[in-house]
Amino acid sequence: MFDWKTLIANQNLLWWGLLITLRYTVITAAVGLLIGLAVAMAQLSRSHLLRYAGRAFVEFFRNIPLLVWLLWSYYALPIFLGIDISKEMAGVVALSLYVASYYAEILRAGIQSIDRGQTDASQALGMSHAQAMRRIILPQAVRRMIPPLSGQTIIQMKNTTLLSIITIPDLLYQAGYISSFTYRPMEVYTAVGAAFLLILVPLTYLARRLEAQTAR
Amino acid sequence: MTVAATNEAPLLEMSGLRKTYGGIEVLKGIDLRVRKGEVIALVGSSGSGKTTLLRCVNLLEQPTSGCIKLEGRVFFHRAGNAEQVRLPSAEINKMRSRVGMVFQQFNLFPHMSVLENVMEGPRTVLREPAESNRARAMSLLAKVGLVEFADRRPDNLSGGQKQRVSIARALNMQPVLMLFDEPTSALDPELIGEVLKTMIDLAREGMTMIVVTHELGFALEVADRVVFLDGGLVAADGPPREVLIRPPTERLRAFVNRFHEMAQLMKPLLG
């Protein structure tokens, strides 16, 4: 039934696609985490304006379908901004901002979950806001954030498959391409699914180990 | 417990202190002076504003109006909505670093060992080198009887041990004033003694202390002054024997009677 020779013959395209998928996952997760941290800090700030802006950012990106946002970034954003951006740039911007909104909520909730008494004790010692964050609040909050952050990053890797819609040659795009001339979609998409599982299941396990380690 | 000469400027001076929470006035104009070396017991029924007052001393709560001076220096002043002195936060942090605080719920840092907890203030706030910091931290842990727990995490300690660690943590900043917010209220009865013993030792060494407490026995035997708060006002302020043995008002008398038997429990601890 399965004709695995198709995969062997086109393996270069698949490996290349996998590399692209991983690259977009890592880049958009890293950029998203930085933006997410800034948005979380804005939401926790004393300024009404910053809090409102942070809230608006999160609500916008969490409530727009990613596919719509991605297509809009590719087709409409360049027109609105009057600049020419590559599809790669549109992909990175769209996916980073999208995941940033989820990261921001995880970071904000993690920081807010730390008992108020910890801030009291830090302030009573004479710590500045930044010192209390760095030494007392964040080290405790990060522990609680590891499971939801790794969960969101896994979703992010799966979400990169949407990049194929704007013709970025990720793993899914290559699979579609190979199917189009070999007529063996079953083998090709089975391989793509297996690749995601082979990468993400061990990563989930590692995240759990990391969580258990920091929890002690 | 050695009271300095009366003419010396007070270490802490609060005047006309008011605090309003969402329309409810919790403090209605408090005047309080604390001289160096004095031990003040701040008593009153729940809701009388004593914890709020204590938290105003180091500005963990922002008073609505009033004036606070520490060591002769104004660091908070606000009259109504008019003129206002609020030091830049760096100055407020500096003030806080000179005032130790002990909380009802201990608030130890759970991600650090006992020793790291005690060393954290000087390390982060004063940027003190580890060597002298560690030596002082260890001697403070010895003083509160917890040297052998230095490498443990706070989670593995009893409530009484946690509170003694938090006292050591505050003392390691070498404060001029110590604030205690109901330090024994979260403890099992059999653990209260060890914390009170630590506080009594501290008082006898001459530390200036403001203690919000329900332990009237401690107030009677250790405090130089008892300040009774009632409905956001100072209802009585004087030597413990005057305030607690011959309560000047009916409300205070009712309050004291409820706690009288506790004085007996304190006797053995005072030796």
Image: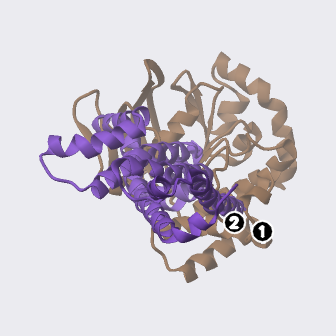
**Outermost residue, left side:** A82
Q: Is residue B196 visible?
A: yes
Question: Along the polypeptide, which appears first: circle 1 or circle 2?
Answer: 2
Q: Which colour denotes chain A?
A: purple
Q: Position of residue A214 (x, y in %)?
A: 66, 63
Residue nearest the viewer, comparing B171 with B233: B171
Asked where in the image residue B253 lies, by quadrant, the reply is: top right
Distance from disc 1 to disc 2, alpha carbons, whole Å, reads 7 Å
Residue drawn at x 71%, y 53% as measured from the top left:
B163
Per the image, label 2 sits on a secondary structure element best described as helix
Q: Which colour denotes chain B?
A: brown
Residue drawn at x 41%, y 57% as measured from the top left:
A28
On residue B149, which mark appears? 1
User: How are the colours assigned in the image?
Assistant: by chain
The amino acid beneath tag 2 is Val
Q: Chain of mark 2?
A: B
Q: Position of residue A46 (x, y in %)?
A: 35, 40
Are the residues tagged 1 and 2 within 8 Å (C-beta)? yes
Residue drawn at x 58%, y 46% as measured from the top left:
A114
On residue B114, which mark appears? 2
Q: Is residue A55 left or right of residue B119?
A: left
Residue drawn at x 24%, y 42% as measured from the top left:
A75
Q: Which quadrant, please, contains the N terminus of chain A? A: bottom right
Q: Position of residue A179 (x, y in %)?
A: 50, 54
